Image (tube, rainbow, N blue to C red):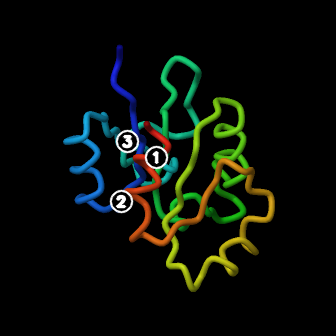
C-alpha cells in the first residue's frame, strides 16, 4: 500500500514534518504559485493529489491580481477531498474565519500546538 502524502506550504514547522516522516508519511513541498517552494497547489490532480495539506493562513491568501486565490485552493480541496489544516493562533481564529467566509468544511483553522494531533487523526 502506498504511503500517504502530506503537502506542506513553505514555513511549516520542521518538527511537525519530521514527526510525520517518522510516523510513515511522505511530506512534499507545495507552492502557492508565488514562492516556488514546490509543486504548485493549483496543479493538483487526482493522479498527484495529497492526503492532507498543511500550512499557514498567509500562504493561501493572495493579492487581488495574483493568479492563485484562496478560492482556487478551496476548489482543489473540495474536488479531490483533501483536508487543509491552516495554522492560526487560537486567539485569531475569528478574524481568520472573517477572511475566509467561503472556506469549505475540509478547511480547518488550528492553533499550531494542535496541528500534529489533528494531522495524525486525519491520516489514520
Give the residue at the far top of this rendering. Answer: 1
Residue topped by disc 3: 38
Marks 3 and 2, how far apart at CA: 13 Å
Q: Are circles 3 and 2 on residues that touch, CB within 8 Å?
A: no
Measured along the vertical axis of the image, is residue 89 above or below residue 110? Answer: below
Residue topped by disc 1: 121
Quadrant of image for the N terminus:
top left
| Numbered circle sitting on residue 12 | 2
Q: Is residue 33 left or right of residue 25?
A: right
> Circle 3 — which element?
loop
- Residue drawn at (43%, 66%), measured in percent from left and top? 114
Q: Is residue 37 left or right of residue 61?
A: left
**For the residues carrying marks 1 and 3, which lies nearer the camera in this image?**
1
At label 1, counting other C-alpha atoms closer than 10 Å, the crowd grade (few under 14, some 14-19, many 20 or more) is few
Q: Tell me which label, 1 or 2, sits earlier in the chain.
A: 2
- Residue drawn at (66%, 47%), measured in percent from left and top? 106
Measured along the vertical axis of the image, is residue 48 above or below residue 26? Answer: above
**Foreground residue among 81 and 117:** 117
Amino acid at each position: 500500500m502506498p504511503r500517504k502524502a502530506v503537502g506542506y506550504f513553505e514555513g511549516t514547522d520542521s518538527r511537525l514534518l519530521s514527526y510525520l516522516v517518522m510516523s510513515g508519511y511522505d511530506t512534499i513541498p507545495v507552492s502557492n504559485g508565488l514562492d516556488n517552494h514546490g509543486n504548485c497547489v493549483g496543479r493538483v490532480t487526482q493522479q498527484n493529489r495529497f492526503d492532507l495539506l498543511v500550512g499557514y493562513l498567509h500562504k493561501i491568501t493572495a493579492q487581488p491580481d495574483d493568479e492563485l486565490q484562496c478560492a482556487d485552493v478551496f476548489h482543489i480541496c473540495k474536488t479531490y477531498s483533501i483536508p487543509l489544516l491552516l495554522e492560526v493562533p487560537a486567539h485569531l481564529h475569528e478574524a481568520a474565519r472573517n477572511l475566509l467566509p467561503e472556506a469549505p468544511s475540509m478547511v480547518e483553522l488550528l492553533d499550531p500546538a494542535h496541528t500534529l494531533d489533528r494531522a495524525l487523526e486525519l491520516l489514520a
